[in-house]
Every structure is written in structure tokens, then in C-alpha cells.
């Protein structure tokens, strides 16, 4: 049997294992580094499948590295399983209704992302075993993708050293190879401490931490004119001191995200923001504490590897849907605002210039977009991802699989509601196949690996990966 057909039947034969794990993780949504229940699903399956398991790497209790096989090449596959706060949502319901008010939910589809990566790892492992292929598979269990950046800590601590390539995927509302970059980011807490006082009787005795935070924000607004256009600086108040207006507030805390296309650009802005925070403390006679939360690098797509992964996507797309599944996705598509639907039309029109007007409309109004988008590479950036750090260490490729309702964004209640559907399950299995097939290409085609590595070296042009997270900062 053709090896890729064999992979398909291996994965289909074990499909219920992966689907059940994805659904259970959906049911125990956990955020950041606290992914205690979710990670157990991986431990159980990986041990049963004969992987050697190292738990709790890089000072993160719920991270892991699962290894199978021996010798070169060593293929890294990246799994995520963290959820988001305040996104609790009843499954299969096309209106926003939390299961638990304020609870967590899998709004970024990481219950699928991680189990899709697991599917890929188990699939290629089984092929290695059955066909006696040389090479090593490492599945990395990476907590806190959403915020905190588990992979960035793992990268800093050398956990990815020794692998030759990394493969990943993400659920999306379209199917494509990931040929864009991402923004590097610094995440920092600025905590001010002042002196409380009665705001009317003895204001001269008070030193307001809230004033310091406000002055810092004003300073940063002025800074915006003097940083590169592509930089993004945003903040949240974590502490405003209190709710009484007649008290000089003794504490305040701001959480800043500082982003730019390149890590050194983000670092330059970060250093200036620190000076503004110091200035605000000086003006208000308050104490400043700068707490480094996390940081991650920009993403560098490896074109050779991404192209190989894209070729495999061609083999497994379009995803076939039943009439019931199309109707199921339609109910979510009906919740998409008109302005977004107009943008979907533009997206389809620019991606498929060869299509007629009618055909473009058809693509743009599919409740689940199953059409494979063309392969493109660009410096375009949207958000940030800790896959960025990995991509600096080894050639990295990712794809997105359309298994979320068209026009609905990541971090939405629609993604949570859709997260246990048969369409979502098909998405994770497709992703697993794409990953396993690409792993097979790398294992059996030394030229592909050599090409990917040469490209990586040429893009980095002598630069070495340097983590932006200081050595003494621990995941928190
Ligand atoms: Zn995500």
C-alpha cells in the first residue's frame, strides 16, 4: 500500500481515540499554565501508544515531551490545549449562552489543535513502526499559548534543541498554508505603589498610584507618534487602587502588550515604555515595580516545508460534509454580521481571481469554507504566537484547516459551540493527516530537509535565536 494511504487508514482506524480526547478537553477548559486535566488525556494516550514521556519540562508542570523512534531526522510536532477565560458556551447552540457565567471555554479551538497534533504524531509513529522507518518523532505539549507562552519558555530553556523541523496547525474558518509572519510581543506588568490618604482632609499626605498609572498611559499616547507604524501597544488596568473616589489610591497595576514585526523592534519600544513608567513614578513620588510576564518572537514560515505541507493539503481537501453538517454550520453562519460577510466576499474574490462572480459568491457564502486557498507567502502579520520562537530555532511549517464556521473569528462563542461537532472532529483528523504526511515526506526525502535547513540558515543570515525572556523569569 502507498505509505500515505496507509497513514490515512492508521488514523481513521484510531479516530475515536482522538475525538474522545478532544471532546473531553473541550469539557475541562483550563487557561494558561493550569492545564492539569487536559494534559492527562495526552499522558494516557501517548503512554498507551508506546511513546516515552517526559512530564513537566521548562518549569511547567503540565508541559511534556513525548518521544518515539530513534536517530535522525527528528521531527517536532506542537500541541496546545489551553482555553480562554469568560468564553463558556453551550455546545451546538447558535446563540451565546454560557454553561457557567464567567467560565472558561475553548474559543480558540485548542481542544482540536492539540489532539490534531496528537493524531499526526500517533499516525506517523505507527507508520514508522509498521514500515521500520528511521527517525524520531517528538510531540511537545505546550501550555499557555494564549497568554504566558509556554513554547517561549521551552525555547529559552533549550527544550526544542536537537529537533530538525517543527510542524503545527490551527483550526480556522478557511483551509490554507500559513505563509504569513506574526508580531513579536513583550508582555509586562507595571505596578505602582503610593501612600493612601483622605482625599479631602489630607491629600498632601497621599501619593497616588492611580495618578502614576494614568500619567504612564498619557506618556505612552505621546510615544505613539515616535515609534514605527507597525508597532502595537495596548494595555489593561489590573488594579485601580479601589472604588472609593475620596481615597488617594495607594496601588495600581497596568498590563502592557508591546508588539512589533521583529523582536528587536518590540524591545526598543519596551525600553521606552519602561522609561515612561519610571517618569510617571518620579512625577508622583510612587514606587514602580516592573514585572516581566512573557515575550515571544515573530514567526518565520519556512517556505520549502510549508510548500510540502501544502501539497499534502491538496491530497486531503476539500473536506466532505453531509447535508446535516452544512445545515449545522449554516446556523452559525447566520450569526455573522453583514460587514464581515462583505469582507468574506472580498477575501474570496482576491484569493480566486479565476472564478466567475457567481462562483466567488458561492465560496463566500459557504457556511463552512472547504475550498483550499492558494499558497502565498508574505510579511503580513496579525497577532502573535509562541510558535514564533520555535520558527527561529528550526524550519517550521503550519497549516490552517477550515473546520470553524466561515466568518466567525478565533476567541468567539461560535468556536466554542462548534468545538465538539462532527465538523470540528473532521478538522482535527485532517490536520493530523497533513502533519503525518509531511512528517513522512521529511523522513523519506533528505533533499526536502536539506532545502528547508538551507533556507532557514539563509533567512536568519547569521542571527541566532535569543529568547526575550530573562533567565530568572519563571512561567506564572
Ligand atoms: Zn489559538
Image (spheres, rainbow, N blue to C red):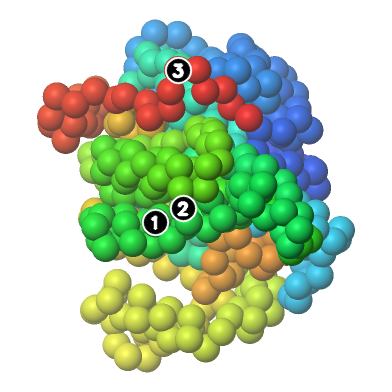
Task: Give whichever of discs 2 and 3 has the lower sequence position.
Answer: 2
Q: Work out how far the residue at label 1 is from the one at label 2, CA to CA, in angstroms.
A: 6 Å
Residue at 84% across / 61% down in the picture?
101
Quarter residue 224 falls in: bottom left
Q: Depth-wise, is mark 3 or mark 1 nearer the camera? A: 1
Q: Dot 1 surroundings within 10 Å: few (below 14), some, or many (20 or more)?
A: many
Residue, disc 2 = 216
Residue 472 rendering spot, x and y as whole percentages: 50, 17
Can see residue 76? no
Residue at 25% across / 55% down in the picture?
227
Residue 262 rendering spot, x and y as whole percentages: 27, 43
* Residue 471, label in figure: 3
Q: Nearer the viewer, residue 339 or 187?
A: 187
Task: Give whichever of discs 3 and 1 has the lower sequence position.
Answer: 1
Residue 198 in the image: above or below residue 332: above
Quarter residue 455 falls in: top left
SS category of the residue bearing label 1? helix
Residue, disc 1 = 220
Residue lying farthest to the top in this orientation: 71
Residue 98 rendering spot, x and y as whole percentages: 82, 64
Residue at 63% across / 42% down in the picture?
194
Amino acid at each position: 500500500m502507498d505509505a500515505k494511504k496507509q497513514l490515512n487508514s492508521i488514523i481513521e482506524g484510531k479516530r475515536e481515540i482522538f475525538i474522545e480526547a478532544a471532546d473531553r478537553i473541550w469539557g475541562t477548559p483550563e487557561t494558561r499554565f493550569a492545564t492539569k486535566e487536559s494534559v492527562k488525556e495526552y499522558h494516557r494516550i501517548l503512554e498507551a501508544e508506546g511513546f516515552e514521556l517526559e512530564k513537566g519540562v521548562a518549569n511547567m508542570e503540565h508541559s511534556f515531551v513525548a518521544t518515539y523512534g530513534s536517530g535522525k531526522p527528528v521531527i517536532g510536532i506542537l500541541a496546545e490545549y489551553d482555553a480562554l477565560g469568560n468564553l463558556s458556551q453551550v455546545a451546538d447552540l447558535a446563540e451565546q449562552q454560557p454553561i457557567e457565567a464567567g467560565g472558561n471555554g475553548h474559543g480558540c479551538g485548542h481542544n482540536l489543535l492539540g489532539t490534531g497534533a496528537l493524531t499526526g504524531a500517533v499516525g506517523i509513529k505507527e507508520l514508522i513502526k509498521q514500515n521500520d522507518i528511521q527517525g524520531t518523532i517528538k510531540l511537545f505539549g505546550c501550555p499557555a499559548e494564549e497568554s504566558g507562552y509556554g513554547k517561549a519558555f521551552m525555547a529559552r530553556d533549550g527544550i526544542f534543541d536537537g529537533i530538525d523541523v517543527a510542524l503545527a496547525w490551527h483550526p480556522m474558518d478557511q483551509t490554507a498554508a500559513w505563509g504569513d509572519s506574526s508580531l513579536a510581543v513583550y508582555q509586562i506588568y507595571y505596578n505602582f505603589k503610593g501612600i493612601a490618604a483622605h482625599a479631602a482632609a489630607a491629600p498632601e499626605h497621599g501619593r497616588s498610584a492611580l495618578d502614576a498609572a494614568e500619567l504612564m498611559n498619557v506618556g505612552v499616547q505621546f510615544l505613539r507618534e515616535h515609534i514605527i507604524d507597525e508597532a502595537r501597544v495596548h494595555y489593561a488596568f489590573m488594579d485601580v487602587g479601589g472604588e472609593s473616589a475620596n481615597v488617594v489610591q495607594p496601588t495600581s497595576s497596568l498590563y502592557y502588550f508591546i508588539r512589533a514585526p521583529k523582536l528587536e523592534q518590540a524591545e526598543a519600544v519596551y525600553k521606552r515604555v519602561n522609561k515612561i513608567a519610571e517618569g510617571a513614578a518620579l512625577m508622583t513620588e510612587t514606587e514602580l515595580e516592573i514585572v516581566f510576564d512573557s515575550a515571544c518572537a515573530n514567526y518565520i514560515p519556512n517556505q520549502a516545508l510549508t510548500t510540502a505541507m501544502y501539497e499534502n493539503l491538496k491530497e486531503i481537501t476539500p473536506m466532505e460534509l453531509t447535508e446535516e453538517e452544512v445545515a449545522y454550520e449554516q446556523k452559525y453562519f447566520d450569526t455573522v454580521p453583514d460587514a464581515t460577510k462583505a469582507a468574506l466576499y472580498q477575501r474570496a474574490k482576491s484569493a480566486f481571481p479565476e472564478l466567475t462572480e457567481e462562483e466567488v459568491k458561492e465560496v463566500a457564502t459557504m457556511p463552512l469554507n472547504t475550498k483550499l486557498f492558494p499558497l502565498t507567502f508574505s510579511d503580513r502579520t496579525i497577532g502573535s504566537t509562541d510558535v514564533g520562537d520555535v520558527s527561529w530555532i528550526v524550519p517550521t511549517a503550519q497549516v490552517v484547516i477550515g473546520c470553524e464556521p466561515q466568518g466567525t473569528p478565533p476567541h468567539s462563542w461560535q468556536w466554542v459551540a462548534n468545538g465538539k461537532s462532527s465538523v470540528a472532529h473532521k478538522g482535527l483528523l485532517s490536520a493530523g493527516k497533513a502533519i503525518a504526511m509531511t512528517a513522512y515526506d521529511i523522513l523519506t526525502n533528505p533533499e526536502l530537509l536539506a532545502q528547508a535547513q538551507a533556507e532557514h540558515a539563509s533567512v536568519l543570515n547569521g542571527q541566532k535565536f535569543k529568547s526575550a525572556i530573562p533567565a530568572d523569569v519563571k512561567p506564572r
